[in-house]
Image (cartoon, coloured by chain):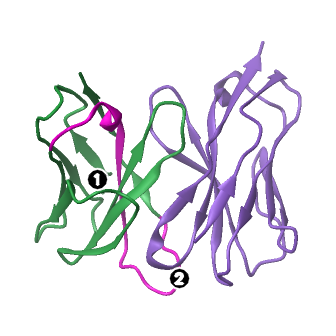
Amino acid sequence: ETGVTQSPTHLIKTRGQQVTLRCSSQSGHNTVSWYQQALGQGPQFIFQYYREEENGRGNFPPRFSGLQFPNYSSELNVNALELDDSALYLCASSLAPGQRYNEQFFGPGTRLTVL
Amino acid sequence: AQTVTQSQPEMSVQEAETVTLSCTYDTSESNYYLFWYKQPPSRQMILVIRQEAYKQQNATENRFSVNFQKAAKSFSLKISDSQLGDTAMYFCAFGGANSKLTFGKGITLSVRP
């Protein structure tokens, strides 16, 4: 059983550019959630994907978008990068969302630096 | 909406001693989970312990235990026999419907040799 993987590990971009981060979910999981963790802060929920559809979104602008593929892997896209987008981006996979919480398994994260 | 509050930004403890990390939360949900996650400098978020809200018994995992006070919406983590490898950031988190996690700001724990 493989765990959650993310790529790339580190990324440096400049303001105004666009970036794509990737996540492969743990075997058997069909739900992926993305979190943004600013330096010294707790992770904040960006959005969740289930069956290739967005299933819940946090307080993030539309320039943060995502995709989920038939194999349940996922991408996070950020357009028009701003300095405040510099953060660790964490991906977590889980079983299908429902009325009860399903445990999330986190990847190692992608460190994005915007200059 | 849920909120999770960790008011202590950092703590320090001597190796082999016991330390308690505090957390309070607010929610209108009745069916939820509470978690403590550890994040070492490697950045990997590691689940330390979890508590199901409908269970009155406090969860325990080896040296880690919680004090869950549902009416007070308090969820503290006790680490016994602290080890150098316990040095990390610790996050309290709330998990409800839709499997979304709400995290506190975290606390930096340093274990002194």
Direction from residue B47 to residue B43 in the image, left or right? left
| Viewer can see residue B70 | yes
Q: Mark 1 or mark 2, which is nearer to you? A: 2
Relative image position of residue A87 (x, y in whole percent): 36, 35
Q: How many residues crowd around disc 2 within 10 Å: few (fewer than 14), some, or many (20 or more)?
A: some
Residue name at image x 68 percent, y 84 percent: B30
Can you identify the residue that label 1 sits on? A2
- Residue A18 in the image: above or below residue B49: above
Which quadrant would residue B8 be assigned to in this image?
top right
Which quadrant would residue B31 be assigned to in this image?
bottom right
Image quadrant for the N terminus of chain B? bottom right
Relative image position of residue A59 (x, y in whole percent): 40, 60
Image quadrant for the C terminus of chain B? top right
Direction from residue A7 to residue B48 in the image, left or right? right
Q: Amino acid at mark 1?
A: Thr
Residue range (magenta): A80-103
The colour with which the image depicts chain A is green
Can you identify the residue that label 2 sits on? A100
Q: Is residue B36 magenta?
A: no
